[in-house]
Image (tube, rainbow, N blue to C red):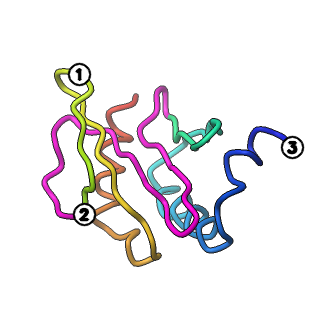
Amino acid sequence: MTKPEKALTSASRTVLQLHHYLLTAIHPLGLFDEEVKKTSVHLVRGSAFAGVHFRREFLIVTVKSVKQIDSERVLKSEQVSKNRWHCEVKISDVSDIDEQLIGWLKDAYDLCT
């Protein structure tokens, strides 16, 4: 089994479709790479602007930010340096991939030039 398969084996077909929909939704932001890790996929433009963690029934998207994102959608926020936060958002339906999430991901994308 290859590494990419290991990172995605516990994900359901629905979760893989959510991942595909997320990538399609952020495609207009510009060019970025997907780096498959053991348990996640990093979305990279110079450095990682987001991480996608696969669960059986949903995704956890970790968004890089310059400040804590004040929203009830954010499950967990962690300050990783003076001006950087990692904020986790649960995606369990395509409706969760909305303008608000895309806005947070755009801000994160813009940080990673």
Q: Nearer the viewer, residue 102 or 15?
A: 15
Query: Which amino acid type corresponds to the residue marked 2 in the rendered image?
Result: Arg
Disc 3 secondary structure class: loop
View extreme (left): residue: 70
Cα gap from disc 1 to disc 3, whole angstroms: 36 Å
Is residue 47 shown in magenta?
yes
Q: Which mark is residue 1?
A: 3
Q: Nearer the viewer, residue 4 or 28?
A: 4
Q: Which mark is residue 73?
A: 2
Expressed as whole percent of the image width and height from the top left, the position of residue 97 reads 40, 68
The residue indicated by pointer 1 is 81
Disc 2 secondary structure class: loop
- The residue lying at 35 percent from left, 45 percent from top is 63
Expressed as whole percent of the image width and height from the top left, the position of residue 50 reads 43, 43
Q: Which residues are magenta?
A: 45-73
Depicted 85 relative to depicted 60: above or below: above
Q: Are marks 2 and 1 in contact (CB under 8 Å)?
A: no
Query: Which amino acid type corresponds to the residue marked 3 in the rendered image?
Result: Met
Apparent side of residue 67 relative to residue 10 in the rendered image (left or right): left
Q: Which mark is residue 60?
A: none
- The residue lying at 20 percent from left, 34 percent from top is 66
Query: Which amino acid type corresponds to the residue marked 1 in the rendered image?
Result: Ser
Q: Nearer the viewer, residue 14 or 103?
A: 14
- The residue lying at 29 percent from left, 52 percent from top is 104
3 or 2: tag closer to the N-terminus: 3
Which image quadrant: the C terminus? Answer: top left
Apparent side of residue 29 relative to residue 5 in the rendered image (left or right): left
Depicted 40 relative to depicted 104: above or below: above
1 or 3: tag closer to the N-terminus: 3
Mark 3 Cα within 10 Å, few/some/many (few <14, many 20+)? Answer: few
